[in-house]
Image: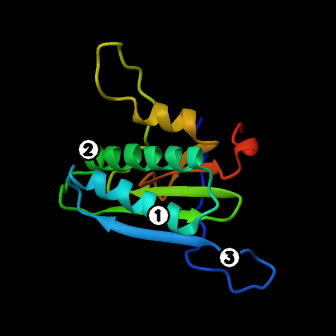
Amino acid sequence: MAQEHFPRSTGRSTSAAAPLRNTVEVFLPSEPKHVKTSRQVAASALERWGGIPARVADDAVLIVSELVTNAILHGGVDTHEAVGLRIEDTGNELLIEVTDGNSQPAQVKAVGGKETGGRGVLLVTRLACEWGTCNENRTTWARLATHLQEQAC
């Protein structure tokens, strides 16, 4: 079940005791061709940051793809509204946030075996340690442990 989450502040910590955080944030046009762009942004950032197991990085890219696809397909009335993508690596976990213009929360749908779509949030549920919505349901977030032994949340 999704839980309420309040996004963390952006940017790097200035405290010597707090770990440095890697963050990428982009705004993409709400067009299907930009799902590929979102995957490229995520893969590039995760590779650049390093230290993230390949399986976790692959799961994160798939989650980004599914959440951005949902945002583009169901993100609101104005198809020209940008979709926000934010990925943060705290050293212990990845936090993925996708923001759109729809205040209806993302939900796991029951789909039949012959349907070719509608399984995005189900995939997120299976891959993430936890997920939810915030920002009046306009942001859907997912959290993944960056260490494989912690991945079974």
- Give the residue number, with chain letter if any, for mark 2: 73
Tags 2 and 3 in contact by the CB under 8 Å rule?
A: no
- Give the residue number, with chain letter if any, for mark 3: 20
Tell me the distance, in whole angstroms, between the alpha carbons under discs 2 and 3.
34 Å
Amino acid type, label 1: Arg
Number of other residues with Cα within 10 Å of mark 3, as a class: few under 14, some 14 to 19, many 20 or more: some
Tell me the distance, in whole angstroms, between the alpha carbons under discs 2 and 1.
18 Å
Q: Nearer the viewer, mark 2 or mark 3?
A: 3
Label at residue 54: none
At numbered mark 1, what does the secondary structure look like: helix, strand or loop? strand
Amino acid type, label 3: Leu
Q: Report whether 14 appears left or right of 99.
A: right
Number of other residues with Cα within 10 Å of mark 2, as a class: few under 14, some 14 to 19, many 20 or more: few
Label at residue 86: 1
Quick check: 44 above or below 11?
above
Of mark 2 and mark 3, the one earlier in the sequence is 3
